[in-house]
Image: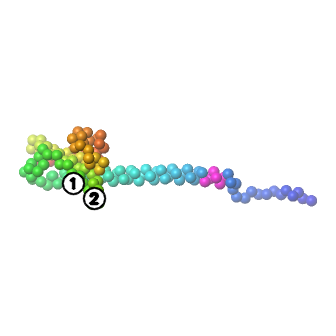
Amino acid sequence: MRSLRTNKRYQGFTLIEVLICIALIALALLGLAEIFTLSVLNNMRSDRMTNANFLAQQQVDFLRNLTSSELATLFLNQTIDEPLDVNNDSTLDYRRITLVRPTGNNYEVRVLVFSAEQINTDIDSLIQNPDRYRVKARLITLISR
């Protein structure tokens, strides 16, 4: 009589092999999820900086279109402080500070754009130390007349 024991071929995976495979896949997916989250945060930061640079450039373009007398009358030795709602949702998004100073025949224009977190911060503190308050855009240029 033949032995009751026959050579069985193992087909399929054992429970431990399946659990190890699931754990490895989970680790890979967690790494991908973290990379995805970081990329979304970086995209949002980049978007805010792009908008801030656009707002600074927009202000300089506006000032460049003024005549010398308009520039002197409206902006000379004044600090313009504007809270801005970019997307018209009744929430202030940025704070733009513009300084115009005469330098001979030219005007030095300095535009600082801060995020909404700095809406209530003292303006002198923002002007004196913009890096401390995480300026989003800083544009300094000369306008000649």
With 68 as the anchor, is 98 left or right in this view?
right
Of the 4 image quadrants, the one containing the N terminus is: bottom right
Q: Nearer the viewer, mark 2 or mark 1?
A: 2
| Nearer to the camera, 28 or 19 | 19
Q: Residue furthest left?
A: 69
Majority SS type along the magenta span: helix
Q: Residue at x 24, y 54 (%)?
A: 84
Q: Which residue is mark 1?
A: 58
Q: Is residue 18 magenta?
A: yes
The part of the chain drawn in magenta is: 17-22
Which residue reaches farthest right? Answer: 1
Residue 56 seen anywhere in this rendered image of the structure: no
Q: Which residue is mark 2?
A: 90
Residue drawn at x 42%, y 52% is 39
Q: Secondary structure at mark 1?
A: helix
Q: Which residue: 17% across, 48% down?
A: 80
- Picture colour scheme: rainbow
Measured as percent of width and height from the top left, residue 30 is found at 52, 51
Residue 66: quadrant of the picture: bottom left
Which residue lies at the image location 26% right of the left edge and 42% below the top edge? Answer: 130
Residue 78 at x, y percent in the picture: 14, 46
Q: Amino acid at mark 1?
A: Gln
